[in-house]
Amino acid sequence: MAVTRATHELLEKALARIDLSWDDARHLLALDVNSDDAYALLAAANRYTRQQSGGRGTVYSQVGLNVWPCPENCDFCYLATKHGIVKELHELTPDAVVARARTFEAAGADEVYLMTTANYPLTRFLEIGQEVRRALDPRTVLVANIGDFGRADAYRLRDTGFAGVYHVYRFGEGVVTEIEPARRRATFAAISEVGLDLRYCVEPLGPEHTPDEIVAQMFLAREFGATIAAVMRRIPVPGTPFEHAGLLTETEVAKIVAVVRLVLGERLREMGVHEPSLLALRAGAHRICAEVGMNPRDLAVDTATGRGRSVADCEAMLWEAGFVHERKRGGVSNGIVPERRENKRETCVATTSGRAAGGEHESMKKWGRC
């Protein structure tokens, strides 16, 4: 079977580093995941990323500092005050945050994110960030994942040693959240004005989101100047309004990763997927995350005991996908697959129509295996 002419031309356009339009993106998102065209899409995005990255993958890490009820009241997050799920307050001490950050770095993480609820005091966050920055190797990138802030606080983040910020205009912002869209946009303006590196994500993705809604997220990433992007599916956390709203398959997520990779093109330095997915790592992603502490998608106080993965888990998955993880502090991790832990979930290569994602599908012959 052959790839349709329309899809063929769009993939050639993307690989030639020509911007894809809104309609182009909608066409690719509408592809049946079991079709030859969809396999060609995954192959093209995989090729794009491997050529751009030289076959190298990234492991970043995140430390969640606190478990508090959050007044932003996001429907998809268990921490929302209105859900009444959080009964006890938990907060890591500064020493504990530093210890976890150093553990991640020693294990080989390239970046350390510090994440809090939106109501965490910024001054306290900056003090902890300063301690973490002093404790880490200068080559380890420090990133903030916090609530909204203005230009003056953006300067404070930068001066503390944060090189980047993870910030997202989520699906349904101001509708399924109590975050004022204008306030959110003002934060993106502050990030840009101060020169902080923006990490963006198309999230939280659910089965109900339409192609136009998903494309809108890609074009917001363009507008806000994201240099790193990712795709994250919504987890139906018990006790939230989305508990029974369904879950996108990893196959669908991989298709969306591929489209985001090609639509954002050379604007992106790296492309990720969250949570880690082997199939997505064969569809344009090469960046995944290890986590400890609070996690909005996980009722465990420390996600390391739940949904979170370790650096070793992430390095093993990159190896399985054919990426090399070159640690910033020297050494290549991927010569041997780390020993798997029995209490961790296994992720298998997803298949559609009985064909493995990394297999010899006809579409691979045109766009190549990298």
Image (tube, rainbow, N blue to C red):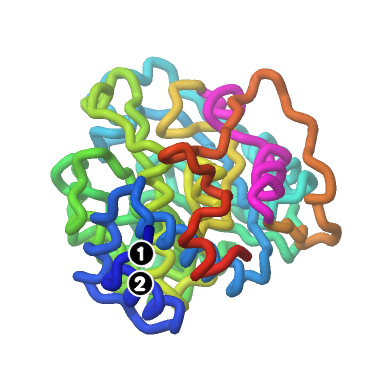
- Depth check, front residue: 1 or 45: 1
132 in relation to 71, above or below: below
- Observer-side mark, 2 or 1, equals 1
Q: Which residue is mark 1?
A: 3
343 in relation to 128, above or below: above
Q: Where residue 8 is drawn, which disc sits there?
A: 2
Question: Callout 1: helix, strand or loop?
Answer: loop
Q: Which residues are magenta?
A: 301-322
**Which residue is depicted at the point 65% across and 19% down?**
343
Q: Position of residue 361 (x, y in %)?
A: 51, 54
Question: Callout 2: helix, strand or loop?
Answer: helix
**Which residue is depicted at the point 57% across and 49% down?**
359
- Depth check, front residue: 108 or 345: 345
Q: Where residue 50 is drawn, which disc sits there?
A: none
Q: CA distance from mark 2 to mark 1?
A: 6 Å
Residue kind at label 1, given as amino acid type: Val
Instruction: Using the rendered image of the protein, determine whether residue 273 is visible from the camera's viewpoint.
Output: yes
Q: Farthest left residue? A: 175
